[in-house]
Amino acid sequence: MRLLIFCVAVFVSCLSASAQRINTAQIDSLCNESILYADSLGSNSIKLAEQAIVLAEKSNDSCLLAEPFYSMGVALHSKARYDDAVVHYLDAFDLASACNNYEISIKTSNNLGILHRMTEQYDVAVSWYKKALEFSRINDDIQGQIHALNNLGSLFAYQEDNQEALFYFRQSLDLMEKHPDENMEEASIRINIAWSLYALDRKSESLQAYSEALDVLKDKPDPYVEAVCLKNMGEIFLGEENFNKAYEKLKAAEPLYEEFDNKSSKADLFYLLYQVELGRHDHKQALEYLEKYQHLQDSINTRDMHALLADIQEKYDNERLKKEKLEQEKELERRHNLIIIGALFLSLLLIMMFFILRINRLRKRNNLILSKKNKTIREGLQYGRYVKEKIMKHHPQDMQKYIQDYFILDLPRDIVGGDFYMLRKKHGALYVLLGDATGHGIPGGFISQNCLYLFDDAIREYSSPRDIIDHVIQRWSLQSEQSGDYDDGFTAGLVKIEISGDVELALWKQKALLVKNGEIHTLKHSKIKAKSGIFTAKQKLNQGDTLVFTSDGYYDQLSEETRKTMKFATFRNVVSSCSNDTPEDMKKALIDAFNKHKGKQPQTDDVLVIGMMF
């Protein structure tokens, strides 16, 4: 009897294991089909993912749910349902992490990075790409590491942080060179490196990187990648007015582009050849290439217009049918409610007449009260600005033996603002401070005035800029009872200038620009390191050097046209273009660039820029 019971138990266990294997195979099949249909126009992808989720839930094994949730995220992502896609990606990531399913963890992290990049949440995208890189390293997934590094490089390149982009692209290339058996696009990575070097104005290195990419393509031919290399090299030579070299590269790219139906790229190539032929004084050939360029442009515009018209027509038909149905439903509802509305209308009319008369009387009285209060508040704000300016007041004659000249661009958003500065002569040196308190208007004014008193006391007690800022941070922490949490409060940049030209600089959550020997440098924290701590530097500045401090209000200003911020790179370019001008001219150039970007858009934040010429 016992033997019979044992045999039955073994048989049931085998059946259960077999069913589990069948369920797992079915789930994998449904997930693969769901991802396969993700780019299609129908909803098959979502339905298949739903079936996989239901099947995985029946198995009572939570680890089996990671892949179906990931597949649903891909399906929703492809249908532009980004919020729903994020929810399923996060569920898949949590389950995969708990079950040590590194493959799903890597895929989910990468897709979350892509999705947040599409929605312009760049800091979140960076964090997910870095998680994909971390899991790839744990899983010893070389291709995953290379893919994550390329994603990071591409994201920083898109944000015009080409130095950071170059760092990740080179890491990717180093991995590939150490693992030559990995089937990855080495030439494409070298092109990314070349493009980053070109954006950093390191043209000779960029040309070398493109040449190395072409060498790789000899063993692994890819006509399109080769065409891109040659075209970009030709464009660099064209910029250097080396027309013969440019002609050689662009002509080599021309037959390669003929193999692809990419009218936009061909048009760009023909326009470059037109410019080269003008430089070579072959006007006949220049005219032929210009005509080819114009023909392709017309074709592209016509094709895009047809596609746009078809899309609009389809949307119009769908909207028209929906509108007709809604109108029928509304008409029935309208007739039903008409009698009730008529009865209520008379009642409401009488009530409204009563309240309108009462409101008019109250409004006249309140307007008078508000007018008096507004006048009192404005006078108080103006006096507050006067007090703040009194604290920040400096004496130009005390600065002449330390620096050649300077300018201060102070544009508060309201009457009082959160940006503040201070110029003090102490310990035989000149101290120049630029600070940015959290907020603007009245709150920012209060915080900035408090910061000014703290910095004034600290400069009397300490001589090192780092010690001064650190002292103020500690004092601020005690006042705000935040126990060392410095994320809110203020940012600051402080420079100590000796008569000899020696300069000591300290930055707390700020950036500064240094123009030295005709080259411009950005002084800031490395993004690779932690954000905590105070950045310090010591320099010997000579005649002709320029140091520029700024609050983030300048380059965080929104544009009227694009609704995007100016970005620090644009501010850097403006300073670089007028670094040899007089202080007044540089100040005017900064104001003009700021107003041009802002347009009629209201000022977003307080703006403060200090430039010092040595």
Image (cartoon, rainbow, N blue to C red):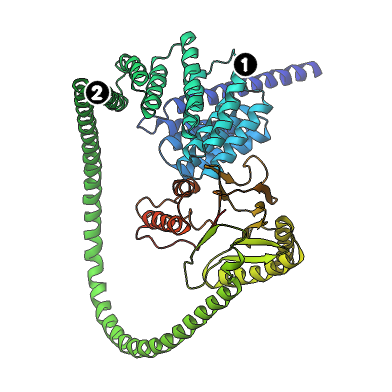
**Which one is in front, 80 or 406?**
406
**Which residue is found at the position 41% from the left and 22% from the top?**
233
How many residues crowd mark 2 within 10 Å: few (<14), some (14–19), many (20+)? few
| Amino acid carrying mark 1 in the image | His
**Which one is in front, 420 or 295?**
420
Residue 188 in picture, x, y percent from top left: 48, 22
Residue linked to disc 2: 281
Q: Quick check: 573 above or below 175?
A: below
| Amino acid carrying mark 2 in the image | His
**Is residue 575 rendered to the left or right of residue 542?**
left
Q: Quick check: 136 above or below 403?
A: above
Res. 179 mark: 1
Whether residue 61 is visible here, answered yes or no, is no
**Which residue is found at the position 47% from the left and 66% from the top?**
413
Where's the N terminus, which quadrant? top right
Residue 220 in picture, x, y percent from top left: 48, 11
Give whichever of discs 2 and 1 has the lower sequence position: 1
Tell me the element at label 1.
loop
**Which residue is found at the position 59% from the left and 57% from the top?**
403
Residue 19 in picture, x, y percent from top left: 61, 22
Q: Quick check: 534 above or below 453?
A: above
